[in-house]
Image (spheres, helix red, strand yellow):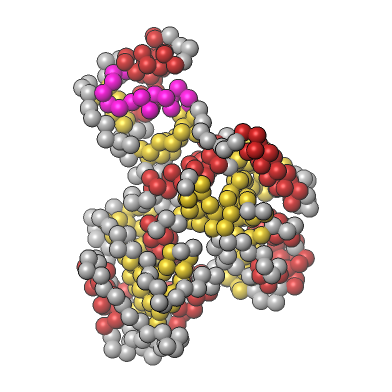
Amino acid sequence: MIQKGHYLVKDHEVLFTSMGEDAVLLHAQRGDYYSLNKVGARLWVLTDGSKTIEELAGLIIEEFDISLEQAEQDIVELAEQLEKEGLVKVVETPQNDQST
Amino acid sequence: MATGSTHVPIYSGFLVKLLKSEHESTVITELVRLGQKSPNVHLETADFNVHGVKTRAATNSIAVAAALTGFLSAFPGSESEAPDIRVHLYTTESLDEAMAPVPEEAPLLYDWDKVKIYHQGPLRYLEVDTRARVVADVEQRRLVGFAEEELLYSDWLITNLFFYPLWGQLLKESGLFPLHAAGLERNGQSCLFLGRSGSGKSTLTLNLVREGYRLLSDDTVFLQEEEGTVKALSFPEEINVSEQTIKLLPELSRVQKFTENELRQKSSFSIEELYPGAVAETSVPALMVFPQIAEVKSTQVLPMTRTEALAQAMRYGYFFLDPSTTGRHFEILSLLVKQTQGYHMYSGNDQKDLGSIVDKLLNNFLEQDQTSGERKE
């Protein structure tokens, strides 16, 4: 179960492009692609393997009108989806993010 | 290896001279050597210059030489210029004798029934059924292929299955990214129509050329980025039309020379025959339109979000995801989407108003562009 003290590490095969407020992710090896809304897109940019979900939530609430509790809950939900799709790994210790 | 009497030169005076670079792939070199080994094999070469990317093709087959020359007739090159891409396509009586199988450990990149592409390091392997194999080195930009002669009975098979898949990848390595789209240009700006076969691209193309638009391509344009702007470059193949389209468009009755393509149940002709001077070489895309045939009287268009347009563009931009170019290709498509406006188009029965619809979309785009300055995210 994903907890707010966990870290998100992007898969290095995932490509990201901003489309205005939204963004598109492409898994370069599988060819699957995904869209992210503006909060998800911002979260992807902030994710570098060195910040916990709690820390990411702290950064998100500075930019969006949302409570810390809600932000943490949303990020956990998104992290579950991203992990299920193989776009991130959720780990217990910080890691250097090699993705671009 | 085939050494039969069918291997005769067709371009007299063009004698193959295969240059060796110091670092070329051992696999490719060995295959080229094998292809040339038979003493009675006459190789012919032809040079093509596709928007600055020079290809030199050598073959021992009349059929292959003729098909490639027709396919790339808009891009004559010069033998005095060093090629960026070297292509060697041989016919053989027995594929297994000519070329080793694809290494079992090579991962599959693309699977389209009888056409498969594998990769291993800088090498890409193409298999067409069990009758043709091609290997390309994306670093050396060189490819060698062998096909059994009986596979190559149609120009379409030669160009689209034997030659194009890995040559297209070498073009990407050289900065030209093919996009499966029709492209029409007016005043330097273009509208790209992206859709599968049967979505009405050729009918749209012909209707717009009649309205004074110039043609970049009926089926594939090349994308090239220059200082942050994506350009669409021409690939003026012959236009493919179905029997139904020929009946619908009266001007097609004036076409003297149709090329029959039984495999695709379509006929093709050169746009220059009907509309001399109708081919444009380059343009800056302003619109991306995704057409589909609809049971409506008048054609309707609906704007798309950029995210939706990019997702759709990737369907038509990526033939297969090659690890060496996927990132760059993604960037080019993203840039293209950012500089254009995307639309769904529901093509109605009455296409008389098509020119004015596209005109209006282009004018709207230009007005918005002028209002907002450069379109940047």
Point 34% across, 44% down: residue? A29
Q: Is residue B280 visible?
A: yes
Left or right? Give the position of B341 relative to B139: right
Dividing the picture into quadrants, the one containing residue B256 is: bottom right
Up the image or down, A38 lies above or below B36; here it is: above
Q: Magenta residues?
A: A37-53
Residue B178 pos. (x, y %)? 48, 56
Q: Looking at the rendering, in which quadrant would you find the N terminus of chain B?
A: bottom left
Question: Does the magenta portion include A10?
Answer: no
The tally of labels here is 0
Residue B186 pos. (x, y %)? 67, 54
Point 28% across, 18% down: residue? A52
Up the image or down, B22 lies above or below B307; here it is: below
Dividing the picture into quadrants, the one containing residue B38 is: bottom left
Q: Nearer the viewer, residue B155 or B69?
A: B69
Point 70% across, 47% down: residue? B358
Residue B244 pos. (x, y %)? 70, 62
Q: Is residue B71 visible?
A: no
Question: Does the magenta portion include A38?
Answer: yes
Left or right? Give the position of B168 relative to B285: left
Left or right? Give the position of A96 relative to B65: left
Residue B67 pos. (x, y %)? 49, 75
Point 48% across, 12% down: residue? A65
